[in-house]
Image: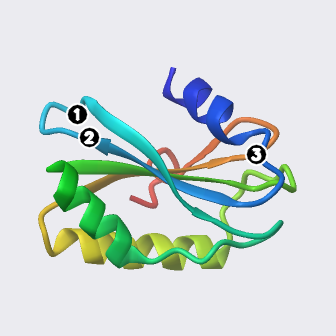
Amino acid sequence: MLYDYLRLKLAGEHHEVFGVVFLDSQLRAITFEALFHGTINQAAVYPRVIVRRAMDLNASSVILVHNHPSGASQSSDADRALTERICASLGLIDVRVMDHVIVGSGTPYSFAEVGLL
């Protein structure tokens, strides 16, 4: 169900969009926000913005999500490095990253499912 929702939000975009599903302590969605918009193959993402929104919303965990307009759902080295930076930043305020999902033309790629989180 989450993948379907994320596909609806991001699959039709022609540029990269990076968003966050903010979750409460019961793992219920507080909101989804598309925080960063980029070009056809990259988006500038600032962990401090994610940290600030998590604090504003009193989130206890998050699910990161972005699309690949090319259709490829695999993670890149840059995706993995960014995920590590965001995990470290959110860890300082005790907010857990539950997953990072990449939406492409096929089945979404889940960092959690492949053991990267």
Where residue 63 sits in the image (x, y, percent)?
Answer: 40, 48
The residue tagged with tag 2: helix, strand or loop? strand
Name the residue that disc number 2 marks: 23
Give the CA distance from mark 1 to mark 3: 25 Å
Instruction: Tell me the mark number nearer the camera, choosing from 3 and 2.
Output: 2
Vertical order, 23 against 91 (above or below): above
Name the residue that disc number 3 marks: 104
Which residue is found at the position 51% from the left and 20% from the top?
1
Which residue is found at the position 66% from the left and 29% from the top?
8
Vertical order, 23 against 42 (above or below): above
Give the CA distance from mark 3 to mark 2: 23 Å
Three-letter amino acid code at the position of disc 1: Leu
**Number of marks present in the image shown:** 3
Q: Can you tell which mark lies on residue 113?
A: none
- Residue 77 occupies quadrant: bottom right
77 lies left or right of 12 = left
Give the CA distance from mark 2 to mark 1: 5 Å
Vertical order, 101 against 47 (above or below): above
Three-letter amino acid code at the position of disc 2: Leu
The answer to whether marks 2 and 1 mark residues whose Cβ atoms lie closer than 8 Å is yes
Seen from the viewer's position, the closer of residues 63 and 74 is 63
Where residue 39 sits in the image (x, y, percent)?
Answer: 78, 70
Name the residue that disc number 1 marks: 27
Q: Going from the N terminus, do you reach mark 3 or mark 2 first? A: 2
Seen from the viewer's position, the closer of residues 78 and 9 is 9
71 lies left or right of 20 = right
The residue tagged with tag 1: helix, strand or loop? loop
Which quadrant, please, contains the C terminus? bottom left
Q: Going from the N terminus, do you reach mark 1 or mark 3 first? A: 1
Three-letter amino acid code at the position of disc 3: Gly
